[in-house]
Image (cartoon, rainbow, N blue to C red):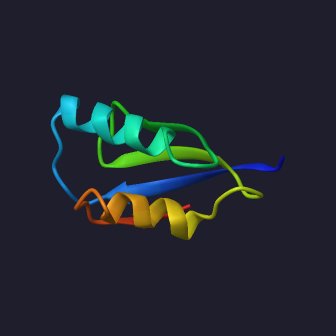
Amino acid sequence: MHITDMVMHVDNNLEENSRRNVESKLTGQKGVIHAHFNERRPHLMLVSYDTERTSSFEILSGMTGQLLCAERVG
């Protein structure tokens, strides 16, 4: 297991419930350990994932599958 973190910027303006739903769906993806929006900067999301089970591109694909516009920023 090799865990790494990625910061994503989500362009959509999401209410708190919508952010929690996105976090739940991402955390349910194969290889994703944790996904959490920053409370002070709700457009930023930290995602921890196992690089042996998934990739940042697959995680971004999961975001676009939810009709969200997101990009990696770190």
Query: Where residue 37 appears, x then y in whole percent?
Result: 39, 38
Residue at screen point 27% across, 56% down: 66
Give the vertical position of 42 relative to 7 (above or below): above
Query: Where residue 74 appears, x then y in whole percent?
Result: 56, 61
Give the vertical position of 42 relative to 5 (above or below): above
Q: Is residue 16 left or right of residue 26?
A: left
Residue at screen point 21% across, 37% down: 18
Front-most of residues 8 and 18? 18
Residue at screen point 51% across, 44% down: 46
Give the vertical position of 30 relative to 58 (above or below): above
Query: Where residue 53 appears, x then y in whole percent?
Result: 71, 56
Residue at screen point 40% across, 34% down: 24
The total of numbered circles placed on residues is 0
Q: Is residue 47 left or right of residue 18?
A: right
